């Protein structure tokens, strides 16, 4: 909070004097326009106020309207907020390089660094393009043997590490760090690697971007010299997956796992003998991986192949993929509500050739299923700009509790259509060919489900119930409102209109 201290009338005079710019008129600092009404002259601090001692050179005149708009921010932060909002409005997928381009006028050509390491003296000389030199200690990691040094690196030499740092910046986190670093010292450095003559920053992207935004021209860095990327990549992914330092775009994480998976998969396929998902997991465990990690890798690869398929129209409604921020879904919600329920959990212990074929069928089934859902609940309806009644129906359908509950109802209904009664078999619900007739029945169920009155009910009570996180509670509620498995299947004579809502 930067609530500034009261200003005496003597001080006000001095500040007024400094604010006379336009023909000796007192002007608002924000838009430089003359403040014609004396009662509209107010005062505010330019940078955050840090001590109780009033430094009037930090104060300026603002008009009443702008003073109100600025709120608790300093003027510097107020401008930064506008600029940052604008920056993310143009594209929600922003990375450190975009910040460098905007704030440091960095072009696409990378400035190069030369390194002279002296292994005997354990020093390293860093030579910049403009002939500046830094000498630093050359250090050695006892666990990995990686060599590294610490240095303050001018920002024009910094690049975002696309290989190890695929995540975009998150506006709230960047904003918080920016405000924090305006008045606090950065405690830990950003972590980089040096390859040939380029420095790539892979950890601490938000911190680095916040520093650049705050006007720093150099960053404190820990720089690894030509490290083994694969091992850094895993360290980085594991750290972020476990620590969950920030909301992670699951989709991007999935991508990265899949690219690691590719190499190991090839290696496994070159081995002799019976092959299965289960066998692959064992192979990875033998190579020192954790079982959970290995299973996660297969699962990610399956999810990936569904999400990235061009035929998957649901992707248009996922915020991680759609630049518009008003999407009904995130990858994570889709994963929890649909993928976890409808995709057979790996590893399968059947011959890889069979399981590959079945996984492909499962993949196509899921995409078809998602497209049907989109057709009956989103296409031509989802319209966040207008927010008409149709759109609101769609919104209710995708409230957290509702989404999980109806996907569970659909799973049970589909199992009944496919005559699957065994619980274990139900776990592999889409791992099979589904006939045209059965698809028609599934489509009818979906159509029925999304045409119930409960979705039109705009009462607050309805809204609040559909948002509950306990999906079995929501499911019981939906059942009372005419959406149960039997009704979805058309197997009951009772119609919802006979219910007293
Ligand atoms: Zn103003």
Image (cartoon, grey):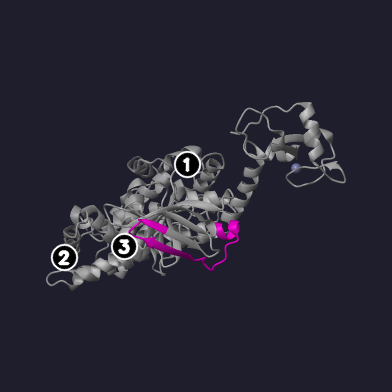
Residue range of the region highlighted in magenta in the rendering: 99-124
| Image quadrant in which the N terminus is located | top right
Q: Report which quarter residue 313 is drawn in.
A: bottom left
User: Which mark identifies residue 230?
Assistant: 3
Q: CA distance from mark 2 to mark 3?
A: 30 Å
Q: CA distance from mark 2 to mark 1?
A: 45 Å
In this view, the residue in front, 12 or 423, is 12
Name the quarter showing ligand 1.
top right
Dot 1 corresponds to which residue? 463
Queried on whether the Cβ of the residue with tag 1 lies below 8 angstroms from ligand 1, the answer reads: no
Nearer to us of marks 2 and 3 is 3
Q: Earlier in the sequence, mark 1 or mark 3?
A: 3
In the displayed structure, 225 sits above or below 214; it is below
* Callout 1 secondary element: helix
User: Dots 2 and 1: beta carbons under 8 Å?
Assistant: no
Disc 3 residue crowd, few under 14, some 14–19, many 20+, Cα 10 Å: few
The residue positioned farthest toward the front in the image shown = 121
| Image quadrant in which the C terminus is located | top left
Q: Earlier in the sequence, mark 2 or mark 3?
A: 3
Nearer to us of marks 1 and 3 is 3
* Callout 3 secondary element: helix
Residue 155 at x, y percent in the picture: 53, 57
User: Which mark identifies residue 350?
Assistant: 2
Nearer to us of marks 2 and 1 is 2
449 magenta-colored = no
Disc 1 residue crowd, few under 14, some 14–19, many 20+, Cα 10 Å: some
């Amino acid at each position: 909070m930067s609530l500034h201290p009261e200003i005496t009338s003597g001080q006000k005079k001095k500040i007024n004097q400094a604010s006379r710019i336009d023909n000796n008129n007192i002007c608002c600092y924000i838009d430089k326009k003359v403040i014609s009404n004396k009662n509209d002259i107010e005062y505010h601090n330019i940078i955050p106020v840090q001590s109780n001692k009033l430094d009037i050179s930090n104060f300026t005149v603002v008009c009443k309207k702008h003073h109100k708009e600025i709120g608790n921010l300093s003027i510097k932060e107020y401008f930064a907020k506008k600029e940052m909002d604008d920056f993310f409005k143009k594209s929600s997928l922003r990375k450190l390089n975009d910040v460098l381009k905007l704030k440091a006028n960095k072009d696409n050509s990378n400035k190069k660094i030369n390194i002279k390491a002296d292994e005997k003296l354990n020093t390293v000389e860093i030579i910049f393009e403009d002939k500046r030199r830094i000498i630093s200690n050359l250090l050695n990691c006892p666990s990995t043997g990686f060599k590294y040094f610490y240095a303050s690196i001018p920002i024009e030499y910094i690049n975002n590490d696309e290989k190890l740092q695929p995540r975009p910046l998150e506006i709230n986190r960047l904003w918080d760090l920016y405000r924090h670093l305006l008045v606090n010292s950065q405690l830990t450095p950003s972590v980089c690697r040096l390859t040939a003559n380029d420095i790539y920053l892979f950890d601490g992207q938000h911190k680095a971007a916040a520093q650049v935004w705050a006007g720093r021209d150099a960053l404190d860095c820990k720089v690894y010299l030509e490290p083994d990327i694969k091992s850094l990549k895993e360290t980085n992914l594991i750290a972020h997956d476990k620590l969950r330092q920030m909301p992670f775009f699951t989709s991007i994480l999935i991508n990265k796992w899949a690219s690691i998976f590719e190499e190991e998969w090839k290696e496994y396929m070159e081995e002799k003998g019976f092959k299965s998902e289960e066998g692959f997991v064992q192979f990875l465990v033998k190579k020192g991986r954790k079982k959970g990690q290995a299973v996660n890798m297969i699962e990610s690869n399956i999810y990936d192949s569904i999400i990235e398929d061009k035929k998957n129209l649901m992707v248009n409604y996922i915020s991680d993929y759609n630049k518009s921020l008003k999407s009904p879904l995130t990858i994570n919600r889709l994963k929890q509500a649909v993928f976890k329920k409808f995709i057979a959990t790996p590893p399968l212990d059947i011959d890889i050739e069979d399981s590959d074929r079945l996984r492909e069928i499962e993949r196509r089934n899921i995409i078809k299923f998602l497209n049907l859902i989109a057709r009956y609940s989103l296409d031509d309806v989802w319209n966040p700009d207008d927010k008409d009644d149709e759109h609101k129906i769609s919104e209710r359908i995708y409230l957290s509790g509702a989404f999980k509950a109806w996907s569970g109802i659909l799973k049970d209904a589909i199992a009944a259509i496919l005559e699957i009664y065994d619980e274990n078999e139900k776990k592999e619900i889409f791992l099979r060919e589904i006939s045209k007739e059965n698809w028609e029945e599934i489509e009818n169920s979906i159509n029925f489900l999304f045409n119930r009155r409960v979705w039109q009910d705009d009462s607050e009570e309805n809204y609040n119930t559909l948002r509950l996180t306990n999906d079995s509670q929501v499911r019981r509620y939906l059942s009372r409102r005419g959406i149960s498995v039997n009704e979805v299947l058309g197997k009951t004579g009772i119609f919802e209109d006979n219910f007293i809502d």
